Amino acid sequence: MSTAKLPPKAEQPVICVVGARPNYMKMAPIIRAFAAYRPALKTLLVHTGQHYDAAMNDRLFADLQLPRPDINLEVGSGSHAVQTAEVMKRFEPVIEQHGARAVLVVGDVNSTLACALVAAKRHIPVIHVEAGLRSGDRKMPEEINRIVTDQISDLLYTTERSAHANLQREGVAEERAVFVGNVMIDSLMASLPQAVAPAELLAAAGQNPERLAQGYGVVTLHRPSNVDSADTLVPIIGALREVAARLPLVFALHPRTRGNLERFGLLRELEAENFIILPPQGYLEMLGLMAGATLVLTDSGGIQEETTALGVPCLTIRENTERPITVEQGTNTLVGVAPEAIVTAARSVLESGGKRGRVPEYWDGHTAERIAAHLAAWLKTAEVEA
Ligand code: UD1
């Protein structure tokens, strides 16, 4: 379609992109905050379809009061190359048809990188929310997504001050990065009053709520490096079984993890032990579970931040984190993947109560408002200068 029919730049939408589960909690408050600037600032919400299961999508949209996407690109699963390429192919016509004042991407999933690339090549400003986080591990697909997205972004909103040093090291001009705080915590604070009580959740899942009465832990695992190979997954599950001997563990299974547990013949065993196996949970269910937990064991990025905001001890089953502030100030401990280390750290939490920490600067529930105010002014200036 010809771009000649498009309205003037200032009337074109800011295209906001989501693709996978961790994007939704970041985008919901942003869309709400942008609404206060209508009609001067219009948005178009695009879902790439990277995550498509009802369990990974619909419930979360409802829980977060995220409006239905204006457009769904329905890319589905595939190798990284296929998924990224498919998003790019399908996203470009959206820009052609609707125009874009800017493209706003969040986080570090394949959809984030794909849409940022398309926009940058069409000379459309790229806004990256949650910029500058680095694990230092380029074997993580998200790390590649972070590095490349930040390089081609025009405006980078950061969650912690350490991100600025990372960006500076990579040659990103200082004035492009703005410290605004953590937008995920906006969602957490807005939703905490509606969080579902864990006992209620268990009863609804047909399980005995009494199983949680003496305390419980929450487990999430989905990183390919942890769950795709039996050599890594089997010892991790072994460690979790030892922890479960002392504390019931609620395990909300990502589809990738469920598939691999089945493949390696581990799922049946877990079901017979002190685990409460659940499908991926809604946001309000997850919040309720985490808020009431004695301990959370995870390889997720977002959960490291959410547990810090909730003051709940978190053991991160990874060798590195791109969110160092959760370790330095919050409740997070990096325990690695060695089973003995996981068990020892869990025991220590059970004995001592674990880290309490404090909530980092600007993780205050108002980050999306800061982004909206800054972006509205920035766009005006950028368009005048253009
Ligand atoms: C993606 C993100 C990861 C994020 C995670 C949260 C990338 C590189 N990874 O990983 O950063 O932490 O989402 O969940 O973008 N599947 C389903 N239903 C779905 C989606 C996926 O069954 O709705 C299954 C498919 O078998 C698929 C596998 O899960 O092959 C992995 O999905 P994919 O989107 O490739 O990556 P995630 O592991 O979910």
Image (cartoon, helix red, strand yellow):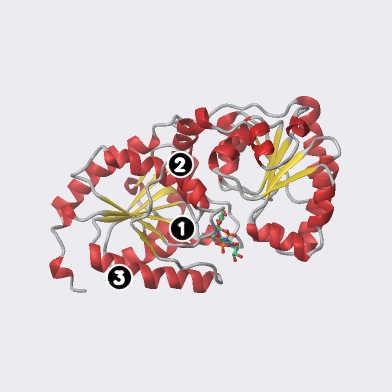
**Relative horizontal placement of residue 231, taking residue 251 as reference (left or right):** right
Return the disc, 3 or 1, that comes first in the chain's sequence. 1
Determine the CA span between mark 1 and mark 2: 15 Å
As helix, strand or loop, the secondary structure at mark 3 comes to: helix
User: Badge 2 is on which residue?
Assistant: 64
As helix, strand or loop, the secondary structure at mark 2 comes to: loop
Residue 221 at x, y = what percent? Answer: 67, 51
Give 375 or 148, whichever is nearer the viewer.
375
Determine the CA span between mark 2 and mark 3: 28 Å
Q: Residue at x 82, y 62 (%)?
A: 265
Residue 55 at x, y = what percent? Answer: 56, 53
**Relative horizontal placement of residue 133, taking residue 30 as reference (left or right):** right
- Tell me, for residue 93, which label it has, or none: 3
Question: Which label lies toward us, 2 or 3?
Answer: 2
Question: Which label lies toward us, 1 or 2?
Answer: 2
The reply to whether callout 2 and callout 3 are in contact (CB within 8 Å) is no
As helix, strand or loop, the secondary structure at mark 1 comes to: loop
Q: What amino acid is labelled 2 in the image? A: Leu
Return the disc, 2 or 3, that comes first in the chain's sequence. 2
Give 38 or 53, whichever is nearer the viewer.
53
- Tell me, for residue 117, which label it has, or none: none
> Measured along the vertical axis of the image, is residue 127 above or below residue 52?
above
CB of residue at label 1: within 8 Å of ligand 1?
Answer: yes
> Measured along the vertical axis of the image, is residue 10 above or below residue 78?
above
**Relative horizontal placement of residue 26, taking residue 269 as reference (left or right):** left
Determine the CA span between mark 3 and mark 1: 17 Å
> Measured along the vertical axis of the image, is residue 223 above or below residue 314?
below
Residue 207 at x, y = what percent? Answer: 73, 40
Q: What amino acid is labelled 1 in the image? A: Gly
Q: Which residue is drawn at 44% across and 66% down?
A: 74
Split into quadrants, the picture shows ligand 1 in the one at bottom right
User: Badge 1 is on which residue?
Assistant: 19
